[in-house]
Amino acid sequence: MITLEGIDHVVLRTTKLPDMLHFYCQVLGAKLERELPKEMGLVQLRAGSALIDLVTVDSQLGQLGGKPPSQDGRNVDHFCLQIAPVSEQALLEYLSQHNISCEGFAERYGAEGFGRSIYIQDPEGNVVELKLKC
């Protein structure tokens, strides 16, 4: 039912945005792709065919993830997997058959632009976004 196509993006929470930008752009060679207004707290970096999203923990988006990164606070907000095109209803039914709860699809930006996706959780509580490949 689900055919994985690759990783679309990874979302990292940070209290050190300038240092993270320097590391990922200057040291590793990622390119700035998109930046939302400061209060939203999202900077998106191009890493080959995928994105690395940096979210400041004190921003609107960052506050949704809880405590700042530390031994007791999570650093990875979620990761997104691209999946082959499939009917949204069929995918929802498939997930339901496997007792995986989720909310409805929404239009979100990822490595290949805007597209439809949903959020689910793995058995450890990690948030996984499933994004239909364009």
Image (cartoon, grey):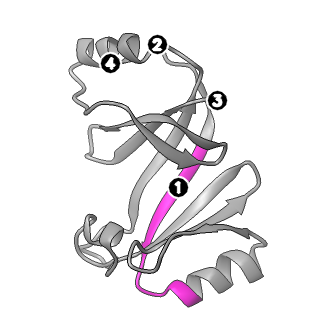
Provide the residue designation for mark 3: 134
Residue 81 location, x and y as percent? 53, 38
Residue marked by disc 2:
87
**Residue flagged by tag 3: what amino acid is it?**
Cys
Disc 2 and disc 1: Cα gap in Å? 24 Å
Tell me which segment is drawn in magenta: 8-18
Disc 3 crowd, CA 10 A, few/some/many (<14, 14-19, 20+): few
What residue is rendered at 31% in x and 81% in y? 58
Q: Residues within 10 Å of mark 2 (few under 14, many from 20)?
A: few
- Dot 2 or dot 4, earlier in sequence: 2
Label 4 and label 3: CA atoms lie apart by: 18 Å
User: Considering only order in the chain, which callout, 4 or 1, is on the residue closer to the N terminus?
Assistant: 1
Mark toward the viewer: 2 or 1: 2
In the picture of the structure, the residue carrying the numbered disc 1 is: 10
Mark closest to the chain's N terminus, 4 or 3: 4
Q: Is residue 12 magenta?
A: yes
Q: Three-letter amino acid code at disc 1? A: Val
Q: Amino acid at mark 4?
A: Leu
